[in-house]
Image (cartoon, rainbow, N blue to C red):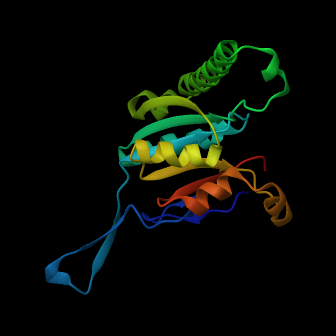
Amino acid sequence: MPALYRIADKRYLPFRIFALPSPFKLNCDPQFSKECAMSYEINSILYASDLSPRSPAVFRHAVGLAAKFGAKLHAMTVSLPATGLPYMEFISEEKFDQIKAAGHNKDEELLRSRIAVFAEAHPEMGVSDVLTSVRAVEGDPAKRILDVAKHVLADVIVMGSRGHTAIGEIILGSVAHKVTMKADIPVILVPIDR
């Protein structure tokens, strides 16, 4: 049974929330200055996918949050830059750009098709009601996720986390860890591969 974590409306959810400052707003009524209520407002969510087989479980959380808060959902995936590969010296720059564009388009189409399959399998979730954009970008995954989050004015980032061991984290690092450490908005990490 997965661990359950408490969220603002006192429900328990099977994921962790890190770096929470931004969407929290303290609302105090002047008549009741001693009693203040905290409200949680989310208008835009960025779902970052690694296109792994377990990413639909992460997408489910992103769609659920978007529906709960009436937020716009932006989906993205990041492919690593194709620089420094051994075959680059044997092809023209124009051909290399074509290869990169084809790979980029393939990643975006794969993300779109997985979203379509999920939406068809789960019509009750209303994916088309919340999904605003789908994109594939290239570059350093953590940096590009943070760039897109700023571009779409995301209030929260939802992504999967494989849960490396402490040693693995030190040696390999992880995109989820880097995003969590550098983000100035909340990051929801959904455990995958468990």
User: Of residues 133 and 81, which is closer to you in this image?
Assistant: 81
Q: Residue furthest bottom?
A: 34
Q: Residue 93 at x, y = what percent?
A: 68, 17
> Quick check: 166 above or below 102?
below
Residue at 49% in and 40% down: 63
Residue at 42% in and 63% down: 9
Number of numbered callouts drawn: 0
Residue 188 occupies which quadrant of the picture?
Answer: bottom right
**Quadrant where the N terminus lies?**
bottom right
Residue at 85% in and 26% down: 86
User: Of residues 178 and 122, which is closer to you in this image?
Assistant: 178
In the drawing, does residue 134 fall left or right of residue 117? left
Residue 103 occupies which quadrant of the picture?
Answer: top right
> Quick check: 104 above or below 63?
above
In the drawing, does residue 147 fall left or right of residue 143? left
> Quick check: 22 above or below 174?
below
Can residue 14 be spotted in the picture?
no
User: Of residues 78 and 121, which is closer to you in this image?
Assistant: 78
Residue 55 occupies which quadrant of the picture?
Answer: top right
Q: Residue 52 at x, y = what percent?
A: 72, 35
Q: Residue furthest left?
A: 31
Can residue 104 be spotted in the picture?
yes
In the drawing, does residue 119 fall left or right of residue 30? right
Residue at 47% in and 53% down: 156
Q: Residue 110 at x, y = what percent?
A: 64, 22
Q: Residue 135 at x, y = what percent?
A: 52, 29
